[in-house]
Image (cartoon, coloured by chain):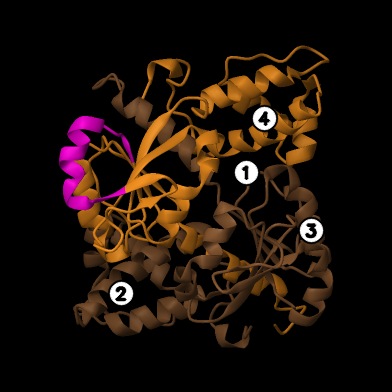
Chain colours: A orange, B brown
Amino acid sequence: MNMAKNTENQTLLPEPTIRRLPWYLSYVRMLDNLHVEYVSSTQISKELNVQSSQIAKDLSFLNIRGKTRMGYEVSRLVVELEAFLGFNSHHDAVVIGTGSLGAALMQDRGLEHYGLNIVAGFDVRPDVVGKRLGGLPVLDISELESWQREHHVSIAILTVPVESAQETADLLIASGIKALWNFTPYRIKAPDDVVIANTSIYAHLAIIYNRMHNTNNDTRQG
Amino acid sequence: MNMAKNTENQTLLPEPTIRRLPWYLSYVRMLDNLHVEYVSSTQISKELNVQSSQIAKDLSFLNIRGKTRMGYEVSRLVVELEAFLGFNSHHDAVVIGTGSLGAALMQDRGLEHYGLNIVAGFDVRPDVVGKRLGGLPVLDISELESWQREHHVSIAILTVPVESAQETADLLIASGIKALWNFTPYRIKAPDDVVIANTSIYAHLAIIYNRMHNTNNDTRQG
């Protein structure tokens, strides 16, 4: 993993900004495919329903400046956003727990376009250990520590059952993992120098149910 | 879909509360499996690293009260959290775009434990339309409108390529979909009475890269 590439990416960005940048990227990628040359923050604002002053502020973190009356050069904005978000670097990762979600992530080539390079999966189940998923090996979790001494992977994707979340996280951290992408609904405890990103798909479901119920309860009985 | 079951779920909950409730649920489910009878907010606080006053406040939305010196009855807390979050109701959903992520979600039985009942997938690709995934039919997106007239599904899981996100969303909304679970990095525009939940897995990756880089740049070269 080459972190040196990422030289601009030195600031601890506010999380809301990081959440918006991929929206801008997907929009300007589309414009780039349509050979559009320039885009203004006003135009991005209309399309994405984000205030144009906020867009200008978010993009000010990047190594790019808009031209008066023209706006941002689309092709450069794509490149700068990808670089800034780390999507054009390669970050090796392991998947821990190769159940349905873990297996899906191992077979999903889409993540490569965002710089994530999954190199192996780990599991405890004898019937899956030793097999391959998406061309990648599934290894026994007991081999993780010795495997890590050779591979030094920084990112682990945690897709184990919730009951095993914390003990698995402890094991990963002991073996040198620096960032945990946690897909379990468990709140992992970890030292401050370990990055934890929670993708709470169950929380999102709860939000959908709650909002839907409240949006609809005047208009339909369900 | 029986919304009447969800009678307590009438409040538009603050999103941070909805995000924390599944953490409490996964913890108290574990306690329940260990036959623990009571749990205090202090105990939950220590385990999950959330202030106990915050926990008490979050749980005050529920139809349960803690007992002095004892805390909350674990088994009832599980039931009340599940009911409140909508995880013990059945919510029918369709998957739109049966690529790797969409196909994985159709085959993931885990979502059923959170009340989500996927009934069909839709796609545009002739080589997948007509096949089955996880025992469920994959239908042509052109059939969606007539299919919906019979099935009245409220939730669509959007896992199409980003370029098709908005036009597919428009089609879904026109066919009566009330909630969109958006897995694309595109910011969907929709009328106010349609619920949009964004699961921005790419944004989470960017957060990992940014935080990891900043956490580590003093201590290792990568």
The chain carrying label 1 is B
Which residue is at the front of the view, B174 or A137? A137
The crowding category of the residue bearing disc 4, from other C-alpha atoms within 10 Å (few below 14, some 14 to 19, many at least 20), is many
Q: Is residue A46 above or below residue B140?
A: above
Instruction: Say what amino acid the circle numbered 2 marks.
Output: Arg
Residue at horizontal 79%, vertical 20%? A38
Specify the quadrant that holds the C terminus of chain A: bottom right
SS at mark 2 in the image = helix
The chain carrying label 4 is A
Residue A55 magenta-drawn? no
- In the displayed structure image, the side of residue A46 where residue B30 appears, left or right: left
Q: Which residue is mark 2?
A: B29
Q: Which residue is mark 4?
A: A55
Pointers 4 and 3 within a single chain: no
Labels 3, 2: front one: 2
Q: Which residue is mark 3?
A: B191
Labels 1, 3: front one: 1
Instruction: Provide the residue span drawn in magenta.
Output: A138-155
Image quadrant of residue A76? top right
- In the displayed structure image, the side of residue B55 where residue A151 appears, left or right: left
Q: Disc 2 to disc 4, how far (Cα)?
A: 42 Å
Q: Disc 2 to disc 1, how far (Cα)?
A: 33 Å
Q: Which mark is residue B185?
A: 1
State the predominant SS element of the stretch in magenta: helix
Pointers 1 and 4 within a single chain: no
SS at mark 1 in the image = loop
The chain carrying label 2 is B
Residue at horizontal 47%, vertical 25%? A89
Q: Is residue B176 visible?
A: yes
Pointers 1 and 3 within a single chain: yes
Instruction: Say what amino acid the circle numbered 4 marks.
Output: Ile
